[in-house]
Amino acid sequence: MMRLEELFDLEAIDEIVGLYAPWDAAAARELLELFAADAHHSLVRIRVSAWLGDAASLRHEANRLKGASGSIGATRLETECIALERCAEGDLGELVGLEERIEYAFSVLQETREALRNPALYRKARGCSNIQTAT
């Protein structure tokens, strides 16, 4: 299991939680959970594009997910999307390791999703131990 600092830019998470904290801290978690669900769908579309040999669609979806990941601070997933985007620049039919790269991105997403459900992420991002988070 990766550490939180390997998965996230804690300052970005801090900003998101800080934006929602005056109203409802659970709303920030819900937003991040929605991101994780959308990221899963994006990775499925990436996988389908790879199976079909559709480099343009793979590159487009990897770029979209890279942007979304970066905007919420999911830095490890963003890095994996950059790698997938680079893979799509070549001939997918001859690309060795693309499926493994996609599988690894799925595992990073799973760890990201589990971390988003962990109150320690929000405490660490806010730099305090008494932040209220929904479980």
Image: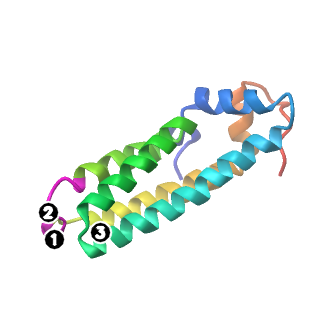
Asked if the residue under mark 2 is in contact with the one under mark 3, i.e. CB atoms within 8 Å, the reply is no
User: CA gap, disc 1 to disc 3?
Assistant: 9 Å
Residue 118 visible from this viewpoint: no
Which residue sits at x=85%, y=27%? 22
Is tag 1's residue or tag 3's residue first in the polypeptide sequence? 3
Residue 135 visible from this viewpoint: yes
Q: Position of residue 119 (x, y in %)?
A: 76, 43
The numbered disc on residue 50 is: 3
Is tag 3's residue or tag 2's residue first in the polypeptide sequence? 3
The residue type indicated by label 2 comes to Asp
Asked if the residue under mark 1 is in contact with the one under mark 2, i.e. CB atoms within 8 Å, the reply is yes
Q: Quadrant of residue 57?
A: bottom left
Q: Which residue is mark 2?
A: 91
User: CA gap, disc 3 to disc 2?
Assistant: 10 Å
The numbered disc on residue 93 is: 1
The residue type indicated by label 1 comes to Gly
User: CA gap, disc 2 to disc 1?
Assistant: 5 Å
